[in-house]
Amino acid sequence: MHLQFSRHLLVMILLIANAPARADSDLDRVNQQRRQAGLGLLLPDETLNLAAQRHADYLDRHREPGRTPQGMTAHAQRPGDDGFSGETPAARALAAGYPHREVLENVSMGYPDGDSAMTGLMSAIYHRLTFLDLEADQLGVAAGERSHVYLLGRSDIAGLCQTSPAEASYRTPVDCLGTAMTRDHYDAMCADLPADALFRPSHPIACPNGLRLDAGYMAALCERPPREAAFGGHGRYFVPCENGTRVDATWFKALCNKPPEAAVYRPSGHYYEICEGPRQVYAEWFEAQCAALPDSARYTDSGRYRRPCATGADIRIEYLEQLDTARRKALPEVVLWPPEGATDVVPAFFIEEPDPLPDFEVSGFPLSIQFNPARAQEVELTSFRLFRTDGDNPGAVEPVRLLDSGNDPNHLLSDHEFALFPLNRLAWGARYGAQVEARVDGVPRHFDWSFTTLGLGVPLLTADRAWQRFTVRNGIDYLLYLPPLADSPYTVLGTRTEHLRGNRVTLEVVDPNTLRVRVDARYCDVIGITFDSGRQVGLIPQGCPQ
């Protein structure tokens, strides 16, 4: 008999071997997660598929899994690179012909198949929340040689961009003497200005007592003054007419002291210029209009707008918020992950870009709760706890870190989203319960749910010492778990095996701390596994044929 040595360098991919409930396509996999969360399913969109495929091709050509150029992310492309289709997800969607830029993108690299890619993305809090977006209803997907790209879109905004209703368009308000007036009301006012609103100046020459005279009245008088107004050639007179006509002083004073109604110029003489032209209107008239603006004419928007459409149209923020609310109204009050009764939840979180736990290489699987903004305006989380409910040491899981919009290091969580990270890995094949206490719009609320981690029913071998032996049955799958160390968070990635020729050992990465191990041995002799960290494991097979 001869010893056989083999060397394995296990690539760092977060592969969940033999993951349950495999879906037929990436679209099915995403919808499987959304269905469990109680959310609407996403429909395929060919334009988003095209944008996703172009980016997957670009990533395969220019990026290696785990290696991202400094200052770049897997969501970015560099102009000038072969296969460039847009710097951002929005730019790539527009370039592919999608009608708007309101898209969300998830990218994974280095996973061998769609199931493991989905498992890895759902263990990463920011990517998970993208898949569980409350407004998206369309999806484009693409699988490259080393990458998976998911591009989420919205049909309601697509429809808005194709046929934009008048109430969606942003129009600047008009200042109505300190009150913001809608542009529509202003346009209607200008289209139907009454004759008595149009400004006419007074007669340029006032009465001796200061009374201002109507210009039209005086124009007629000066053209054909009455006989009694004529100046007789001696005594006092006035020249109130621009044509130099002299009128008797006594007569003119009498007119000014007791003028007929038509002779009096009652406005202040001030005016405002409004509308196109511009048009001059009496100050008193415009001031009265502004003081009595109906509610429908008052501009109550924030004055903000976005340009989501490829056409560049300015769309009111309030209209877009109405679309958001319409999407959310039919959805649950809260979205929990893992969902109630979930099984085969991976016990650990390792990698995400950007990193929600930059000071940890490995932690437990994060829990999340999202409150639906259409059904909960203000949310105050008072407690978020996790409990082990089986095993030798049931009780609260500690330590943990709660992330919210206030302390999220990447400022990506909204004030309705919360994530709880166990700072140590969860156990394989274990049962857990979660509890959340919150005040929702001032009302105390309680939420609790349970889930089970992956590995239930699979024999677990925990190698927590430098040298350890285990007896294993021939032809049976085991999970071999080496807990992470402070100086070696990834414990199983490099291995060397030693065994008799005729014996065979299969090692498959489950995560950077765990292998799936299967021994097929002809001889019941120790099979040695040495790890790059120096730790060693011996497997003693039973039930060998010789």
Image (cartoon, rainbow, N blue to C red):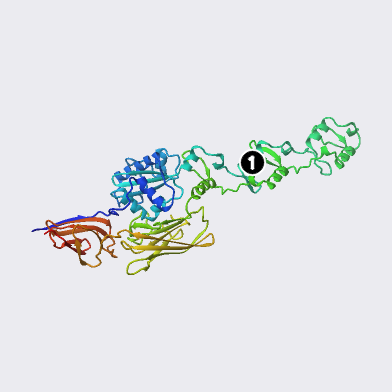
- The answer to whether 220 appears left or right of 11 in the picture is right
Around disc 1, counting alpha carbons within 10 Å, would you say few (fewer than 14), some (14 to 19), or many (20 or more)? some
Give residue 100's position: percent from left, percent from top: 45, 41
- Which residue is at the far top? 224
Q: Nearer the viewer, residue 433 or 130?
A: 433
Horizontal side, residue 364 vs residue 466: left or right: right
- The answer, for residue 442, to whether it is visible in the render is yes
Foreground residue among 455 and 506: 455
Percent position (x, y) of residue 404?
A: 44, 59
Q: Quadrant of the N terminus?
A: bottom left
Task: Identify the residue at the far bottom of this view.
Answer: 393
Residue 68 seen in render: no
What is the secondary structure assignment of the residue under circle 1? helix
Quadrant assignment, res 138: top left
Q: Identify residue for label 1.
A: 186
Image coords of residue 192 (percent x, y): 68, 36
Count of numbered badges drawn on the protein:
1
Q: Which quadrant is home to the C terminus?
A: bottom left
Position of residue 296 measured from the top left corner of the image (x, y, whole percent): 64, 45
Frontmost residue, 108 versus 213: 108
Camera-side residue of 343 and 110: 343
Q: Could you tell whether 309 is left or right of 486 in the image?
A: right
| Amino acid on which the number 1 mark rests in the picture | Tyr
